[in-house]
Image (tube, rainbow, N blue to C red):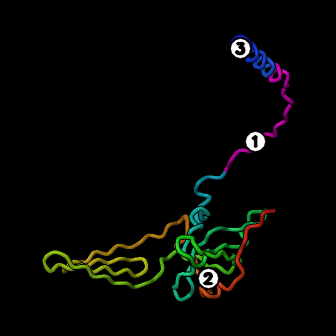
Amino acid sequence: MFTKYMTAGLLGSALLASAAFAQSAAPTTTAPVAAVTASDSSYNGNWRTSKVVGLNVYNDGNESLGSINDLLTDKSGNIKAVVIGVGGFLGVGEQLVAVPFDKIKFVNEPVVNTTAATATGGMNKSATTTTTGAATATTTGSATTATAAKPNPWYPDHAVLSATKDQLKAMSAFKYSTN
């Protein structure tokens, strides 16, 4: 019984090997490869799309509208539309809307919002943190420390769209085509 299985296995292997040897390599012609001349410095000022996707979108009143989920391009690679996720919580219940790319304005400076939080702990020690756009100041007792945020050259801080969240929710939902 074992010899039958062994014989069948050897015969099958021989058939597969003969089919592999029977295939001949087709002649191929390759065009000469052009030398790459671009350097890292030639791309300064361009943004990484992997960093643009996920950016927060605000309106003119610094109210959060959602975040960029996708960029839609034509066949030449030109960005035509921005898909924004509006509403929902952690992606659940979120509606996707497509907005023309020229309606979005990208901003390098952080959103200007002033918030103050006071924490007390220990023996009458208090610390106050104030965030105003690009700078954060922390005051503990009489000492003040200021930290300025440096804009990143590879992507903007956020995007601005002149619309309200209700206007975006009222737009027809964007659906990816399956054809």
Other residues around mark 1 within 10 Å, as few (<14) / some (14–19) / many (≥20): few
In the rendered view, does 177 fall on the left or right side of 54?
right
Of helix, strand and loop, which one carries label 2?
strand
Mark nearer the viewer, 2 or 1: 2
C-beta proximity under 8 Å, tags 3 and 2? no
- Going from N to C along the chain, the mark reached first, 2 or 1, is 1
Q: Measured along the vertical axis of the image, is residue 130 above or below residue 38?
A: below
Q: Residue 8, position in %: x, y?
A: 76, 16
Return the x and y of residue 14 as percentages of the image width and height: 78, 16
Residue named by callout 2: 161
Q: Badge 2, how many Cα within 10 Å: few under 14, some, many 20+? A: some
Q: Quadrant of the N terminus?
A: top right
The answer to whether residue 177 is left or right of residue 154 is right
Q: Is residue 121 above or below residue 178?
A: below
- The magenta stretch is 18-37
User: How far is disc 1 from disc 3 in space, using C-alphas?
Assistant: 50 Å
Q: In the rendered structure, are the residues bearing label 1 and label 3 in contact, judged by CB atoms less than 8 Å apart?
A: no
Q: Which mark is residue 6?
A: 3
Judging depth in this view, the residue of 70 and 109 nearest the camera is 70
Looking at the rendered structure, the kind of residue marked 3 is: Met
Q: What's the amino acid at mark 2?
A: Leu
Residue at (71, 74) in percent of width and height: 174
Q: Residues within 10 Å of mark 3 (few under 14, many from 20)?
A: few
Most extreme residue toward the left is 123
Label ID, residue 33: 1
Toward the viewer: 108 or 63?
Answer: 63
